[in-house]
Amino acid sequence: MIVQHQALALDWLTANDLNNPTSLVLGSFNPFNPNGQAGLDYYYGRTTNQFWKSIARIIGQPELYFFNQQHGLNRKIEVMTARFCCLDVIDSIDFECYNEEILTDYLNRKIFGEFADQTIWTTSTNRSGETINLKRSYNNSILELLRESQSIRKVIHTMGSRIESFNNIKPVELNGDPIGFKQYVREIISICEERGIEFSFYSLSPSQYAVNTGATQIADLDNWLRNNLNL
């Protein structure tokens, strides 16, 4: 079963729909559940994530300011204008398993239910004695944006230790993917170097998991986003 990113399934705003963003924020993946509840309106859209809560704090608004059902997306667009845009590196994931029942249960519980980033970065996992293989397809629109944009001057990412340096990018997978993650990220970095765009390896995850475990401190996250997103 191929699970698409919500951005593709729900036709989210693209970077070109925003007015002259100067920073690009790279995340990982947000799965679309065709049989589930209504999707999100933009990246980092789960109320458990600290990204938009942090921005709300920075601009002096209540934490749930950007999660308003009627006005939330317009508020996001307003604060992003001439500042930043977001994209995720994974477009879709192909999950393969001989047992359809086990695969469906796995997807409902681990991908559509209690989704966590570490779940989607493996090449295979075991579920009830069956092997589930994962094959990721990466987002080429990021490469196109960086090649063509006249406004992007900085790229940051929220994937923490997954991208620490040009030589330390995880995972290094060649499991049938048209391009491995390390090779894909290196292409992003190379385009940035060619076009004079700053690529920052330093990263803080805004996930609630990172905050709960102490890997990300709220004050550090607020300062990091304030400085990198021109807020």
Image (spheres, grey):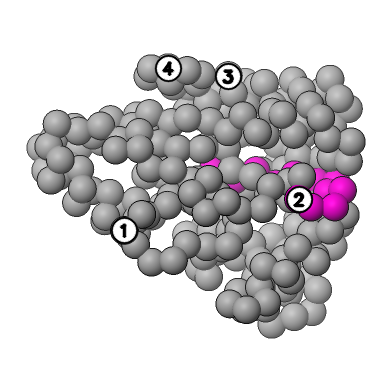
Q: CA distance from mark 2 to mark 4?
A: 34 Å
**Residue marked by disc 2:** 17
> Given the image, on which type of amino acid does mark 4 rest?
Leu
Left or right: residue 11 versus residue 119 is right
- Please give the range of residues in magenta: 17-28
Q: Position of residue 213 (x, y in %)?
A: 48, 60
Q: CA distance from mark 2 to mark 1?
A: 28 Å
Q: Which mark is residue 174?
A: 4
Sequence order check, earlier mark of 2 and 1 = 2
Of residue 218 and residue 43, the one placed in the foreground of this image is: 43
Secondary element at tag 2? helix
Is 145 situated above or below 45? above
Of residue 4 and residue 46, the one placed in the foreground of this image is: 4
Q: CA distance from mark 1 to mark 4?
A: 31 Å
- Which image quarter: residue 124? top left
**Residue marked by disc 1:** 35
Secondary element at tag 3? helix
> Given the image, on which type of amino acid does mark 1 rest?
Asn
Decide whether residue 94 is among the magenta residues.
no
